[in-house]
Amino acid sequence: MWILLEYIAWGLSAAMLLWIVADAVRVNREFDEETLLSSKEGVDELLEHGAVNGNAEDRS
Amino acid sequence: MSDQTASQTGAGSGQERIGLLRVLGPAHVWALGVGIVLVGEFMGWNFSVGKGGAYGALIACWVIGLLYTCVAMIDSEVTSTVAAAGGQYAQAKHIMGPLMAFNVGLYLVMAYTMLEAADALIVGDLLMILAEQTGYDALDPKPFVVLVISFLAFLNYRGVFMTLSLNFIITAAAFVSIVILFVGVQPWNPGAILKHSELLTDLPYGWIGVIASFQFGIWYYLGIEGTCQAAEEVRSPSRSLPLGTMTGIITLLIAATLTWYVCTGLIPWEYLGQATVPLYDAARMTGSTVLQVFLFVGTLFAATASANGCINDASRAWFSMGRDRYMPQWFGAVHPRYRTPFRSIIFLIPIAVSFAFTGLLDQVITFSILSGLLGYTFMPINMILFRRKWPLGSIKRGYVHPFHPMPAIVLMILCITTFFATYLGFGLQLLAMMAFYVVVSIWFVKHRYKYVRRADQFTMNWPKPVGY
Amino acid sequence: MSKRYDPPKQSGIGQFFDAVFLLALVYFVLFIPLIFGLTGANSTNVMPETVNWETLGQNETMQAQWEKLGYTPETAAEMITQRFDYSIDPLMLIITAVIILGYFVFLVKVSDKELREVIRERFDT
């Protein structure tokens, strides 16, 4: 039973990691670098009522 | 952890962020701090028993409690002014300068990534012990280590957290398991299950061992200073932060003392000093299956909650450095849908996995402790310069800690003592860690800093510092 | 007064090399010493000539607990006799102290110089 669990764990990990990498690659293709890097430091956004990470525009 | 969560909720709700955010009270701050740290009671603290004996570990627990009280006082004051995400990294950037900030950012990344590796390692070891108990003694912990890290990285990547509430629940469950174990061993009936009078020995190394055990005494509390990063989400930071942090430290002191009491009454110190999952071992020793199940689940939950917060914090710090160009700018990217620092999350996965694979729990923990300790050494210097450059009254402080500069001086002395404690027994590892920070610092000055925009780093609306 | 500093834009390749450099540094300085066992705790074992619970200094309660944990005198002996080596080598201690102190002095000095530049650009231009 334990050996089976080991394989399942490997499988699940691989699936999740692959998904992450695939998604990252997809995002890199779909969005241009300017958009992805448009976030600014939280300090001024606190004053400007913006979101900390959220200056990147969702274009989809 | 907290600040990241804030940005998640904040990003989702667009412009109404402020209204949504300032909802946390002292109780939340308390739960946040304890959430990351509690895993320290389930593993790691017991190496201090190995370094100084059972009584040595107890003294270390209390003395290091004093160190953290100073950390909390100093951090609360600075944070009540730098009330924004970024934590100690943003503090260093404004008060001491870019190179210090670069180092503080790295301390955060390393301390949290190594803690995360230790958490995953523990899950693997725990399952290995369980497999042995059920008669299968060749279990490979690696797939489970990878599973924990990739699952939590996956959650963090997708920003599907509910981390706050989820972590509350699993932390509370873990805490309850300690209390249940304490009640289960009948502390009112010494000698029945707990056998302190026969198991406790004199200090095996004398007093130098007590000092040596300060190293792992840090582990009882490492990460509690993360509460101060909740500044942005707290209703009244000046009241909630000191209160939440101090009650957090008191809770940990109590939990640590209970843990110490139960474990030393059941397990010979030589074993305890080298065990990987001491609380689970203690439950095994009671012979009660119910207690064993509780502590198994408790250890699992505590490790998961902690690792979850660590991935969050480490990637956040790495991301902030990328955004400021301290690190390649590429890392400053935000995922357009999930609003997470997705590249930083991916980048740190292999580091956590490979250190967890070594199985060398005490040394992985030592890397985490040393990075934390360097961060605490930075604090007193930071505090003294902060009061000098922006004296009381020049900027609005939400909280002013009493007795300045006493806490700074005490903290400095305790940090130096703890460096010495690490030198005893782990001297080469201390040197390796220092070599790492020296090399990256030189790299930063000679190479990296030329890509950084100068004035853009100073984002607070403070007046010009005194003496500049 | 002083001119604004305009940083060069780093190329993608340059960024990639920097990331690889950091990763390599983590593995060379921290990971390799770890797996080759260079950094572990210095410890010694003094094994008694005949190994049993008495010679290992374990009283009856301790013996019972060890056995509950699944150990025999033979399997527990190494764990019980292992002791850290706390002898202090003055030279190593001084070297370590100088490195840590020097590191912090370097940080404070250079950071201050860099901060002055930041402040000047932020407030004086």
Image: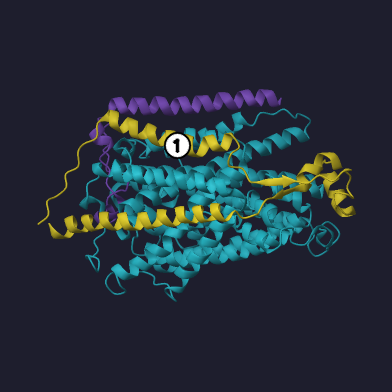
Chain colours: A purple, B cyan, C yellow
Give the vertical position of B330 relative to B284 (above or below). above
**Residue name at image x 68 percent, y 46 percent:** C43
Left or right: where C116 falls relative to B34: left
Q: Amino acid at mark 1?
A: Leu
The residue nearer to you, when weighing A27 against B210, is: B210
Image mark 1: chain: B
Q: Residue furthest left?
A: C1
Q: Within 10 angstroms of label 1, few (less than 14), some, or many (20 or more) residues?
A: some
Residue C121 pos. (x, y %):
17, 55
Residue that numbered label 1 is attached to: B348
Front-most of A19 and B274?
B274
The spot of residue B186 in percent (x, y) is: 80, 60
| Vertical position of residue C1 compared to residue B134: above or below | below
| Quadrant of image for the C terminus of chain B | bottom left
State whether residue B383 appears in this view.
yes
Indicate the position of residue B53 as horizontal and vertical percent values.
Answer: 72, 57
Camera-nearest residue between B443 and B288: B443
Instruction: Residue B158: tell me if it is visible.
Output: no
Q: Secondary structure at mark 1?
A: helix
Where residue A60 sits, quadrant-wise, is top left
Residue B191 figure quarter: bottom right
Q: Quadrant of residue B408?
A: bottom left
Task: Please determine whether, in this image, residue B136 is positioned above or below residue B174.
Answer: above
The answer to whether B356 appears left or right of B198 in the picture is left
Task: Depth check: give the residue in front, A32 or B106.
Answer: B106
